[in-house]
Amino acid sequence: MKDSDCVKVTLRPSGATIAATRGKSLLEILTGKGIGIPAICGGKGKCGKCKVRISEAQASVMPTFLECSLLSDREIGLGYRLACQFIVNEDVEVQVSSDNKAESSQSSRLSLELGPSILPAVRKESLSVPKPSVEDQRSDLRRLTDGITVENGRIRRLELLKRLPSFLRENDFTGTVTLYENEIIDLRSKTDNSHILGVAIDIGTTTIAMYLLDLENAIVLDSRSIPNPQSVYGQDVISRIDYAASPNGLTNLKNAIVEGLAKLSRDIISDANVSSEQVYDVSVVGNTTMIHLLLGISPQGIALSPFIPVTAEEMIFEPFEVHLQESFPNAKIYIMQGISAYVGSDLVAGIIRINLENEKGNALLVDLGTNGEIILKSDSGMLAASTAAGPAFEGGHISNGMIAKRGAIDHVWIDGKGKISFSTILNSVTTGICGSGLLDTVAVLLEKGILASSGKLSEDPFVLHNELGAVTITQKDIREVQLAKSAIRAGIEVLLSEAGITYEELDRIFLAGAFGSFVNVSSAVRIGLLPDISTDRILSAGNAAGEGACICLLDRKARDLARALSNKISYVELSGCKRFSEYFINFMTFPKEANS
Amino acid sequence: MIELNDISQAVIEGNAKKAKELTLIAIEKNVPPETILHKGLVPGMDVVGQKFKNNEYYVPEVLIAARAMNAALDILRPKLATDAANYKATVVICTVKGDLHDIGKNIAAMMLEGAGFRVIDLGIAVPTEKVVEAVKLNKPAILGLSALLTTTMTNMKDIIEALEKEGLKDSLKVIVGGAPITEEFAKSIGADGYAPDATIGVQIANALIQGIS
Ligand code: B1M
């Protein structure tokens, strides 16, 4: 390829680059590199699913007729294009969007780019060893370990060792060895061509997500999530820790999560038409309390100062040790390393997912949950904090609050005629309001002058209504939002001041967590939840934690990185931090005006 | 007297500079410090309390008002007669063992101070023994306890039991507060009052000391 024929495609936010031939469509280039772009119509410009966002400079390239018909003017204005239609004639920066419904008002999403260089912890090797003879009296095990390429190969699973002699003889001393690092974990006949699968799990306080991956082709076969079945024992981490202290509490919590995982795995495995025996590697991330509960370890130390977990270290278990033998009989259960009692491996996975370490300049990763976890990357290193926001963003303590499901008001805006309008999830009859709708409402009420910057509502309760129904917002609801948003913002400010920078110096903010993916970033900025930086510098990291866990299945180096990160990140304790209290009080009011 | 109204107003507006200046002027004009406290600052904080209760004011406004009150109190304190006659009663307040959330407790303390109580704030995460010690030392009429965590609220019970054991419980009234506390919980641990917010805390304190005297 001549230099002049070559163009560079830079993927955002990872910064990875692809060299491509000039004149090819973006879709061809990306899929050629194994980057999953949905293109249901096969790149004919009909389905509109391959929507990507390209850098400003390139967005001036005229959209095609097909693009104009499938994308809104607003989207085109923001640089969205269809990858199948966009011909790359010059270097281009592209942000790949995995959510095809993503509205332009929402933060742009990242999508999982499964790089071509995969190096899983588990892999297959074919085996063919000489048959024993009087001249060659090596043991079966020795014969096996001598016949594979890894050094110090070994078998730890006693059951496997018991199977070894008959396996070798029945298969004529040939077969396929499955290795986990240098441990032989399974033996299969040469004719068994089934692929090695991996499962990634993100255990959140509210939701558990599971991903099924084909580790030989580096693709995600399916992903699912269910509400965390432990919720019946308490909504937040502290209530679960409380419950864990009661008789049988810990066992009930552990069983709930194990059963939840069993259900998820049964569904995901049977729907993919594969067998649970093909799963050799399971990578688990979650907040530190959830990991304790999965392992059946008492989390009591986490609840009270000085907040000491039993472990936040990397651990690898046999499935029976953690009661997952029914779901994953052959797998190794890898638990990613976390940072502290309140900054768990889910955050570390998020950092890996968005490649925060290599992000240029100053960048924040914020997971907007009941506990808001914040990571700041600056020139002086990485800082972490956890701030107790409370459940307002998940609809908790809000008079008509609910989680983001059917009928929840999810977006609120001022229409062209100055009227307050809203949408509900699935366009259903209004049943309540979820976090993103609540934030929008606050922003709109501030804009309309119905809400003062002090947080005083002049119409109490304020009624949001349209043909889908009505929902009231009370003064108390606003006060809850003030507490929650200020707790997050104060946490951000403490880290910024710790790093000696101001929010203007932030180059990027990544929002993780379910709420972070749905929230309208301009509303988040308007109410002061996030610092006032240009909204195009605020990106949604989607399910960063789960995707980080996937990366650890595909690339064992990511596990080294997780360990290194945990040791490199300094945790800033906000409890008893005087500056936090000052910021918390100062940021409880709303910014006077939108600086746009 | 016009200055006293203005002092109240300065507290309500949270104007510390003005509160301080007006207090100095009043002292210069020989207004007794007790009068400045009870006719200037206390009525001002009372309005702040009402506004807080009506949801007109929230945490920041209350804290700013309290700052103004304290600016004036700093001048008054050395001049006020040190005997208890100047105060309705003494309150010892703190957050319980293991609990570092102090904003609610601070507001409750300021409101009590603004209502004319002498407030001894033991601070945050105070071990049960320390609370008992402070009660022995200061002989308060009221003990205010604050907890924001479901894991620490049970420590309120420990404190009340410890006071009973030491025979101190009958000499004072215990008011408990904090987001996870409920009326039933307060009753179940033998507290004398439950304050869902700081203004109600003041009301209950007032009612309880009337019962005592
Ligand atoms: C006479 O005596 C009286 C009378 C009236 C009294 C009284 C005493 N005490 C209170 N009152 C009453 O009057 C006040 C005014 O009207 C009222 O006081 P309140 O205190 O209720 O109200 C205050 C004015 C405003 N409210 C607050 O100040 C609390 C706000 C929230 C956001 C909160 C904050 C700010 C903080 N936190 Co914490 N924190 C949360 C809160 C979540 C939320 N959205 O509410 C909560 C309370 N925290 C929680 C948690 C879990 C934690 N926090 C922690 C830490 C912190 C910060 C340090 C970050 C910070 C505290 C800063 C400080 N100096 O206080 C940790 C624990 C620290 C510890 N050991 O205490 C940590 C364990 C977690 C962590 N990530 O570190 C949760 C408790 C859950 C539970 N089941 O118990 C929580 C509900 C948030 C959540 N995740 O759901 C009344 O209750």
Image (cartoon, coloured by chain):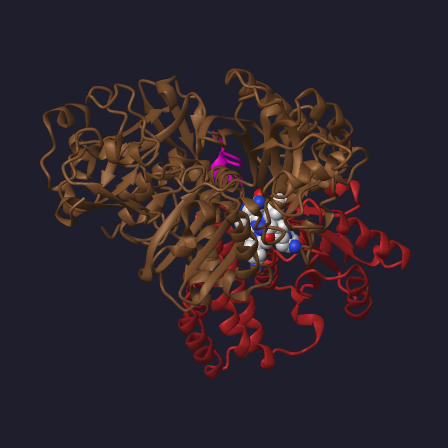
Chain colours: A brown, B red
Residue A506, by quadrant, is: bottom left
- Is residue B40 among the parts visible in the rendering? no
Left-right relation of A351 to A105 = right
Q: What's the magenta bit mostly, secondary-structure-wise? A: loop
Left-right relation of B213 to A362 = right
Q: Residue at x 59, y 81 (%)?
A: B79
Question: Quadrant of the image for the C terminus of chain B?
Answer: bottom right
Q: Position of residue A385 (x, y in %)?
A: 52, 56
Q: Residue at x 29, y 20 (%)?
A: A40
Between residue A281 and residue A70, name the one nearer to us: A281
Left-right relation of A509 to A348 = left
Q: Position of residue B96 (x, y in %)?
A: 71, 56
Magenta stretch, residue numbers: A391-400
Between residue A535 and residue A81, name the one nearer to us: A81
**Residue B158 to residue A270: above or below:** below
Q: Is residue A398 rendered magenta in the image?
A: yes
- Is residue A13 among the parts visible in the rendering? yes
Q: Position of residue B168 (x, y in %)?
A: 86, 59
**Residue B79 to residue A343: above or below:** below
Q: Residue at x 46, y 69 (%)?
A: B4
Residue A136, by quadrant, is: top right
Q: Position of residue B83 (x, y in %)?
A: 70, 76
**Residue B50 to residue A113: above or below:** below
Between residue A170 and residue A268, name the one nearer to us: A170
Question: Quadrant of the image for the N terminus of chain B?
Answer: bottom left
